């Protein structure tokens, strides 16, 4: 854990500080397996998931865009604090990408990168307890409408998709791990999450409802603080890097390796198409 003051004191140095959730950072190190993140082209592995790919692609975009500075990670619970740290210029960039609709609300303070995941590419799975037989039997929109779900109003695309499903009940919970606990204990039937997200941790286990998925109708972007000394150079570098990686197919391959496009590649039914 570190204070705004310590972040601020680092803002003018030749270093990029990135805050990351502890569990995501652990999976990041697991996927790296002592490899240099700037050299990775194979993103397959048990620890690979969308959040981890975001971190690696951000570093590669910065390098390919010409901004080569050492990166220092700070781990902890930053889920609800990152936006303020970004707006105040204590953080340069968020490793966790933003939905475009969320980023646009604070674009007075933040630059919005080109999409790392384009609109229409984000397809999520329905995750439930392995003991919830009714949820696991769902195969259609009508079946899903007989269930309860949990999400957060802070996640605009997720919340909008859940509302449009017409569920029996929709619970608002802003903390990710709390959502997992509600579903694990069967207080709620399901939650949405990207494909290849691991839930077998801390005595919590969720499984995916097979053969159905839901499209989240928005794009995801890196956001860069306009109030950080490196703002302009980082914004330019990230966009340049994204363009190069998009052209080479590197972005699609990275997320595909992580299993993110599983539903599309295996032609699962998208129930809100």
Image (cartoon, grey):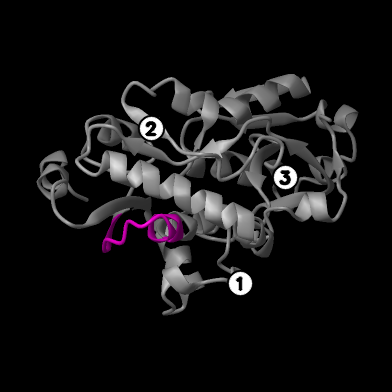
CA distance for labels 1 and 2: 32 Å
Residue at 43% in and 20% down: 105
Asked if the residues shown at circle 2 and circle 3 are in contact, with their CB atoms under 8 angstroms apart, the answer is no
The residue labelled by disc 3 is 125
Q: Is residue 211 left or right of residue 5?
A: right
Q: Position of residue 129 (x, y in %)?
A: 70, 48
The residue labelled by disc 2 is 111
Residue 253 visible in the shown view: yes
| In this view, the mark in front (1 or 3) | 1
Query: In terms of depth relative to the viewer, which is nearer, 163 or 132?
Result: 163
Label 1 environment density (alpha carbons within 10 Å; few <14, some 14–19, many ≥20) = some
Q: Is residue 82 left or right of residue 36?
A: left
Q: Position of residue 93 (x, y in %)?
A: 34, 44
The residue labelled by disc 1 is 45
Q: For the magenta stretch, what is the residue range?
A: 60-74
| In this view, the mark in front (2 or 3) | 2
Give whichever of discs 1 and 3 has the lower sequence position: 1
Mark 2: secondary structure: strand
Mark 3: secondary structure: strand
Mark 1: secondary structure: loop
- Let me know if residue 259 is in the magenta part: no
């Amino acid at each position: 854990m570190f204070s705004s003051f310590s972040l601020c004191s680092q803002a003018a140095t030749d270093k990029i500080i990135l805050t990351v959730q502890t569990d995501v950072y652990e999976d990041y190190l697991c996927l790296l397996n002592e490899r240099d993140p700037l050299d990775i082209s194979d993103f397959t592995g048990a620890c690979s998931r969308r959040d981890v790919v975001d971190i690696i692609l951000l570093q590669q975009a910065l390098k390919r865009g010409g901004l080569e500075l050492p990166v220092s990670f700070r781990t902890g619970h930053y889920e609800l604090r990152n936006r303020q740290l970004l707006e105040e210029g204590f953080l340069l960039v968020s490793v966790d990408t933003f939905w475009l609709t969320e980023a646009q609300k604070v674009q007075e303070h933040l630059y919005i990168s080109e999409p790392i995941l384009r609109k229409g590419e984000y397809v999520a799975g329905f995750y439930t307890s392995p003991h919830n037989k009714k949820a696991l039997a769902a195969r259609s929109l009508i079946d899903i409408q007989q269930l309860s779900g949990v999400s957060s109003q802070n996640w605009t695309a997720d919340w909008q998709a859940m509302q449009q499903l017409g569920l029996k009940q929709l619970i608002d919970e802003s903390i990710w791990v709390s959502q997992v606990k509600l579903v694990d204990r069967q207080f709620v039937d399901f939650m949405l999450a990207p494909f290849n997200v691991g839930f077998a941790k801390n005595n919590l286990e969720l499984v995916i409802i097979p053969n159905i998925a839901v499209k989240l109708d928005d794009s995801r972007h890196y956001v860069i603080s306009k109030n950080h000394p490196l703002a302009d150079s980082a914004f330019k570098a990230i966009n340049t890097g994204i363009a190069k990686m998009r052209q080479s197919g590197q972005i699609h391959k990275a997320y595909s390796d992580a299993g993110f496009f599983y539903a599309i590649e295996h032609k699962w039914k998208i129930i809100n198409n």
